[in-house]
Amino acid sequence: MTMNSDGPFARPTKAQNMSISIKRANQEAIRRIEEGNAMWVDLRLAREVVPGMDEHTVFHAGPPVAWRNMCGPMRGAIIGASMFEGWARTPDEAIAIAESGKLKFDSSHHHRAIGPMSGIITPSMQVNVVRNERFGIDTCSTLYMGTGKVLRHGAYDETVMAKLRWMNHELAPLLRLALHDAGGIDLMAIAAQALQMGDELHNRNKASNPLLITKLAPHLVKVGERDKVIEALRFIDNAGHFILNMVMAGCKGILDAASGIPGSTIVTTIARNGYQTGIRVSGTGDQWFTAPAPVIKGVFFPGFGPEDANPDMGDSAITETMGLGSLAMAGAPAVVQYVGGTPEFAVETTMNMYEITVAEHKTLKMPTLNFRGTPLGIDIRKVLETGVTPVINTGISCKRAGVGQIGAGLTAVPIECFEKAIEAFAATRGVSVD
Amino acid sequence: MNIELPSGDLQVVNIGLESFAEDLRSQGVAVVQLDWRPPAGGNARIAALLAALEDDDDEQ
């Protein structure tokens, strides 16, 4: 099945918006989200499957941002990616190429792609392909590399580059064979199960990652050499959040199907690039509403503190947009050991998120709240009425290029994004208060 | 005009700013706190937009 010719990103016309009830439009958005699914079906080179991925193209997390405004860790990841691609031999050469204007930058969200933290994707990188079968949408994501000194957090020394090469040239082809043998893996089924086991599918994947391994292992053993299979399974296990990037692609594919619904006030994207935080709203299609990226209140690795922290960055808030992550914290009280806070705070956070959402997910449920569905469908009107903005739990990058992850913590989407969004949404319906 | 102050036990519901409730609690007065903030944080323009974009009551 394919989308209609306008695609899910089409911006509704004013006539369409004015004639449709907001409540019904939002119900349609929720219907599409709940009917969507997410099958991890393939791993391919980005140049083969990411729309618009040409040579010297760099897609990044968050709303569009120019090189001159990119933060240190995003620049660091581009330096590493440029050396991986062979565009540059040294960091200085990579910076010179970026400054020369030779690289084409754009938001991954414009190209059916997504990635945590800097989210850098270049043509020779292997990417996950996740399919929303109900709505015929394929979404790609980077491969999860682990924590600490990793490319997505802006590190690029030889240990990082060696791991990136191994993941691309050895791990991904092996996973691809196993995945084909499995006929795909249902990520939302894993998500639903993991929620029952204390995960929130953003910064806590203690259940979902092993569940993924359980699904993969028989097929890996069937298609791979013994030592390579052991190495792959150990890597996925040690990485801890390997499934996150596939879940992110799944969430994006599901939410993209709910984008572009005339009259809908539901948020379909939350994303940050370390310079700005941006949201997109169903009824205003692909338009971004941005504000400066906020700082993160967090727990830091030994030797680092708030003075080292980069502002909020990454596409992983697509999990919160889907009602997972911080919105589902009540179901994952142990996540506070990683991002800060108390189990009571986790419950309080989820309860607050019900105040700004229009539905509760029918299949994603939290046993700690008597199997109540996760808060679903962030409504820009409810955010503005209450002044409660979506909470995000996230990794923290060092603001200096080349260092990597230095902690994890909590932040929130700036209210300014929603103020801009309601103005634009009102304009689509011919509403003015001047 | 004379205003009679309550002479029995006070039954207080505090709406909004919680520090008012805390002051009373510190004096041993039982208070039910109701969280409330002005819509749109008091931003009149946003509040007017929200009023114009409300769901219709008769919608299903």
Image (cartoon, coloured by chain):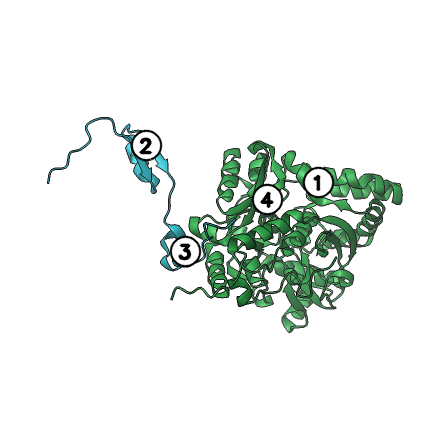
Tags 1 and 2 touching, CB below 8 Å: no
Q: Position of residue A106 (x, y in %)?
A: 64, 65
User: Is A109 positioned to the left or the right of A356 in the image?
Assistant: right
> Few, some or many C-alpha atoms within 10 Å of disc 1 (few <14, some 14-19, many ≥20)?
many
Q: Are marks 1 and 3 in contact (CB under 8 Å)?
A: no
Nearest to N terminus: mark 3 or mark 2: 2
Amino acid carrying label 1: it is Ile
The amino acid beneath tag 2 is Val
Subunit that carries the residue with mark 2: B
Residue A300 visible within the image = no
As shown in the figure, which amino acid type bears the numbered disc 4? Gly
Q: Report whether mark 3 lies on the same chain as mark 4.
A: no
Secondary element at tag 2: strand
Q: Colour of chain A?
A: green
| Element assignment for label 4 | helix
Task: State whether residue A205 is above or below residue A377.
Answer: above
Q: Nearer the viewer, mark 1 or mark 3?
A: 3
| B47 on left or right of A66 | left
Are the residues under marks 4 and 2 on the same chain?
no
Q: In terms of depth relative to the viewer, which is nearer, A409 or A198?
A: A198
Label 4 is found on which chain of the structure? A
Q: Which residue is mark 2?
A: B31
The tint of chain B in the picture is cyan
Q: Chain of mark 1?
A: A
Q: Which quarter of the rendered picture does the C terminus of chain A lie within?
A: bottom left
Residue topped by disc 3: B51
Task: Report the quarter where the N terminus of chain A lies.
Answer: bottom right
